[in-house]
């Protein structure tokens, strides 16, 4: 009887440990707070434009300056996938810069994954295509 209890407890302990390992692996893909300069929107080089992107992992926000207006997205990461939801922006009109801001919002709606290193962050779609690339400031 003691042997059966010991085996049962051992199995229960093993199950609990494996659940913890699974949970930490699923939540290990997190954004790290940092500041970046956007250099590419899709195939468009915007490295000369004044577009920045900041991440606040504490607030789960991505925000920045799109060349004319400030913008912000609340993000959620589930099973290694990121969802930016609906973004908000101030409403100032700037004829030349609006093209980049509109493109930023169009691409942000398609983002599903990301890769972040010490030097850059790349947001991609389901096909693995780079949508937004930003480098550390």
Image (cartoon, grey):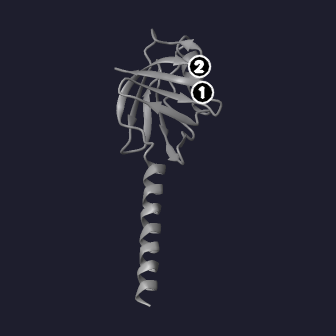
**Residue farthest along the bottom direction in this orientation:** 1
Element type at marker 1?
A: helix
Q: Quadrant of residue 109?
A: top right
- Disc 1 residue crowd, few under 14, some 14–19, many 20+, Cα 10 Å: some
The span from disc 2 to disc 1 (Cα, nearest Å) is: 7 Å
Which x, y percent locates residue 77? 50, 45
Pointer 2: what residue? 42
Pointer 1: what residue? 107
**Residue farthest along the top direction in this orientation:** 48
Q: Is residue 133 above or below residue 11?
A: above
Q: Is 46 or 79 nearer to us in this picture?
A: 79
Element type at marker 2?
A: loop
| Label located before the other in sequence (2 or 1) | 2
Q: Residue at x 54, y 48 (%)?
A: 79
Indicate which disc residue 8 carries.
none
Q: Residue at x 55, y 17 (%)?
A: 100
Which x, y percent locates residue 63? 43, 32
Q: Residue at x 43, y 42 (%)?
A: 30
In the visual, does 45 lie left or right of 16? Answer: right
Which x, y percent locates residue 131? 57, 24
**Residue farthest along the right direction in this orientation:** 127
In the visual, does 46 lie left or right of 13? Answer: right
- Disc 2 residue crowd, few under 14, some 14–19, many 20+, Cα 10 Å: some
Q: Quadrant of residue 54?
A: top left
Report if the CB atoms under discs 2 and 1 are less than 8 Å apart. Answer: yes
Q: Is residue 124 above or below residue 45?
A: below
Q: Residue at x 48, y 29 (%)?
A: 90
Discs 2/1, front: 2
Q: Is residue 134 above or below residue 29?
A: above
Quadrant housing the C terminus: top left
């Amino acid at each position: 009887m003691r042997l059966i209890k010991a085996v049962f407890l051992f199995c229960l302990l093993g199950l609990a440990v494996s659940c913890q390992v699974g949970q930490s692996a699923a939540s290990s893909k997190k954004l790290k707070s940092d500041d970046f300069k956007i250099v590419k929107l899709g195939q468009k080089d915007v490295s000369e434009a004044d577009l920045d992107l900041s991440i606040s992992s504490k607030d789960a926000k991505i925000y920045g300056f799109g060349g004319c207006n400030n913008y912000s997205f609340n993000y959620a990461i589930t099973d290694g996938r990121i969802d930016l939801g609906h973004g908000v922006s101030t409403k100032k009109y700037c004829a030349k810069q609006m093209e980049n801001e509109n493109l930023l919002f169009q691409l942000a709606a398609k983002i599903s994954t990301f890769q972040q290193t010490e030097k850059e962050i790349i947001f991609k779609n389901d096909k693995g295509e780079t949508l937004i690339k930003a480098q550390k400031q």
